[in-house]
Amino acid sequence: MQTESELEIYIHIPFCVKKCLYCDFLSFAYGEEIRSEYLRALINEIKTFKQTEEARELSIKAQTVTSVFFGGGTPTVIKKESLKEILDVLKDTFNISKDAEVSIECNPGTVDGDYLKSVRQYGFNRLSIGLQSAVDEELKRIGRIHTFAQFKDTYNSAVKAGFTNINVDLISALPGQRIEDVDATLERVLSLKPRPQHISSYSLILEEGTGFMEMYEKGLLHLPDEDSEREFHWRIADRLEKEGYRQYELSNMAIPGYECRHNIGYWQGKKYIGFGLGAASYTGRERFSNTRDMKEYISYFENKKDKPYSEKYTLTDGDLISEFLFLGLRMTEGISISEFRDRFGKELFEVFGKEIEKHISEKLLCRQGDRLMLTRKGQDLANYVFSDFIISE
Ligand code: SF4
């Protein structure tokens, strides 16, 4: 259960060796010079955070940081000493709980055993490795820089380095993918020793500005249809459930006790501060995101002009209610009806009675005591359900 005084921190490292064909994340294959300018600016941003209006609003001294997440991009493309420096500055600035979850994302082909050993020693206690597929032809087709064998080396090095909480990222509905390919990935992942404690499995989404979109527009990309996409998703989720994993969110499965605390925080509306290019923050009332322009980011945090945001807005009461529903319903345990009452001082059924009744009769939502959750069919049509919970004011 979260409390008012808990906070999460996200650090964005926007660098990768090479852009994957499906990727629209804020990441670039920049060289050493820009990387070091960026890291200087990032450290400056964290160090000066205490003096900002947002820090005062959050009264950061009274906040306990329960999770830190280094994401990207590929955080492990930067020197390991830089990771330590960032973590040390965070420790000097924030009150980080002794048992905080401290995660870092990593991609095969960017680290060796020594690197991972150091990262573990610095205090990172959760590693998230981008595999996406265990079929080499698929990895090549989506523009990944590694093979399954290289992933296995990284995985074994991570275990050897002492990581006991490892996530493996998968993507399904890849171009040309067949159910046999999905099964092959599952078998290979489940044959890892020890098995990963956590598996994320998202379906590929065709995004603007990606290499895949360009291919699609030229008729060169053949993606599985919607029915196959759902079939692949459930093939993975059901098999993992049989193997002792629990699907706790639409796309996330874990051995019980190893759910990602940081991401659960997002879905439960916990406050978070993001540092780095384009990083988003939420203070309980305001959402704001740093500029997505690298030059602007570096020059601001070196020279301190007006802080450049890519967006900044105050949430209305209606926004907060809508978010409570569509973020909370991503979790398979759903939302608590009494928590809604405690937070908003009104009854959930007074606000959304008609919509909830409709989705219960369509078998997209179900109620179990105090909780309301998506059914299996509701998970397939989650966006349709969520769209009914938007309050426009
Ligand atoms: S490694 Fe991840 S962040 Fe980097 S380009 Fe590939 S998908 Fe995007």
Image: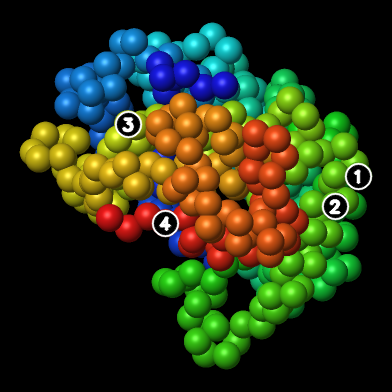
How many numbered markers are drawn? 4
Residue 238: mark in rendering: 2
Q: Quadrant of residue 256?
A: top right
Q: Is residue 73 above or below residue 180?
A: above
Residue type, numbered disc 3: Thr
Q: Nearer the viewer, mark 3 or mark 4?
A: 4
Q: Nearer the viewer, mark 4 or mark 1?
A: 4
Q: Mark 1 = which residue?
A: 242
Residue sitting at x 48%, y 32%: 341
Q: Is residue 206 above or below residue 248?
A: below
Q: Position of residue 275 (x, y in %)?
A: 34, 35
Q: Mark 4 = which residue?
A: 390
Residue sitting at x 57%, y 21%: 1
Residue 352 left/right relative to 307: right
Residue 262 left/right relative to 298: right
Residue type, numbered disc 4: Ile
Among numbered discs 3 and 2, the one appearing first in the sequence: 2
The local crowd at label 4, few if under 14, some if 14 to 19, many if 20 or more residues have their Cα within 10 Å, is some
Residue 12 left/right relative to 226: left
